[in-house]
Image (cartoon, grey):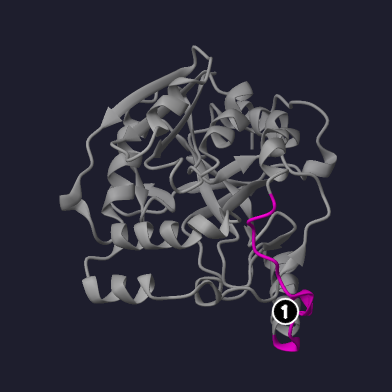
Amino acid sequence: MKVSGFTFIRNGVKLDYPFIESIRSIMPIVDEFIVVVVESEDDTLAKVKSIKSKKIKVIEEKWREDLKGGGKLLEYYTDIAKDNCKGDWCFYLQGDEVIHEKYLEYIRCALIEYKDNPKVEGFALKFKHFYGNYDLYHEGEGWVRNEVRIVRNLPDIKSYRAASGFRWKDDRKLNVIMLDAYVYHYGWARKKSVMKKKVLEHSSWHHKDEKALKEIENKGLKEIYRHAHSLHMFTETHPMVMENRLKEREDYLSIDPKLLNIKTIYKVRDFFANVSEFLFGRRIGEYENFKRVGYYMPYSEFTECKKEGL
């Protein structure tokens, strides 16, 4: 079995993406890592090339201004990266997504177990969205809870909705196995001095409306961080590749502890959502960009690779 990692990045240094950490986080379980580096305004390309590994394969691409709007840019560059993968499985991470080393062997064993089962077209992982700093996160409450990050290396599987996930080219959802492993998303845990730049640049990729972009440009940090409610305190460890970044906390957002007091309406909603997930395998009213066809073993029960399939 061979596994390919893939991603794309633009202005990773300028916008304070942990893209090097993201790439390094899954290097131990991939046989190659395809990185599409889009024409940037900083030394993103040099940073990627500085990774000392024969697994890294860099593809340089021009910036396509004509593809702005509707998330097409993200889909375009993501598909270029995927189309250059040679592995049986393709493991996608965006530039602000990191996998904890504790999950690597668990994930690798799942890929081995389902490699020869054609019913399984991909895997979905859970998400923790760190917010404002490295100590607080969103999980659910209107944010993506689960999404496809590993797919079979088939040409008709394409990125979907601004590369938030994947589907078949004819828009069919993928049949996936749910993994009890998390993607640590650091998109909203970055320096205040660059957060607004990041939001503005990404909005320009999605929108062509100059008036809307101007409104974003005029927003203050309080408006930018408008989702700072119903946060959870993070008490576990971050991935080791994030060690150096964890030391840089002086320019990160300080969140009012009162915001940790989840409103009653959210508690009630989450109670019924949790019950439905326990009974039926999914949460009431939750959108999912895939079809669940099975669950890999809970991470807490994992000890070693199994040989049997579904």
Inspect this view and state whether residue 2 appears: yes
Q: Is residue 259 left or right of residue 210?
A: right
- Observer-nearest of 98 and 195: 195
Q: Is residue 177 above or below residue 20?
A: below
Q: Give the percent coordinates (x, y) of residue 12.
A: 44, 41
At a point 52% along the width and 20% down the height, the residue shown is 51
Residue sitting at the far bottom: 265
At a point 75% along the width and 57% down the height, the residue shown is 135
Q: Is residue 221 left or right of residue 78?
A: right
- Observer-nearest of 33 and 18: 18
At a point 35% along the width and 33% down the height, the residue shown is 37
Query: Is the N terminus in the top left, top right, bottom left or bottom right quadrant?
Result: top right
Q: What secondary structure is the stretch in magenta mostly built from?
A: loop
Q: Is residue 286 above or below residue 165?
A: below
Q: Is residue 124 above or below residue 161?
A: above
Label 1 sits on what residue type? Phe
Q: Is residue 93 above or below residue 55?
A: below
Which range is magenta? 249-265
Inspect this view and state whether residue 86 appears: no
* Disc 1 target residue: 272
Residue sitting at the far top: 54
Q: Give the percent coordinates (x, y) of residue 155.
A: 31, 33
User: Toward which corner of the image does residue 298 lie, by quadrant?
Assistant: top right
Residue 23 in magenta? no
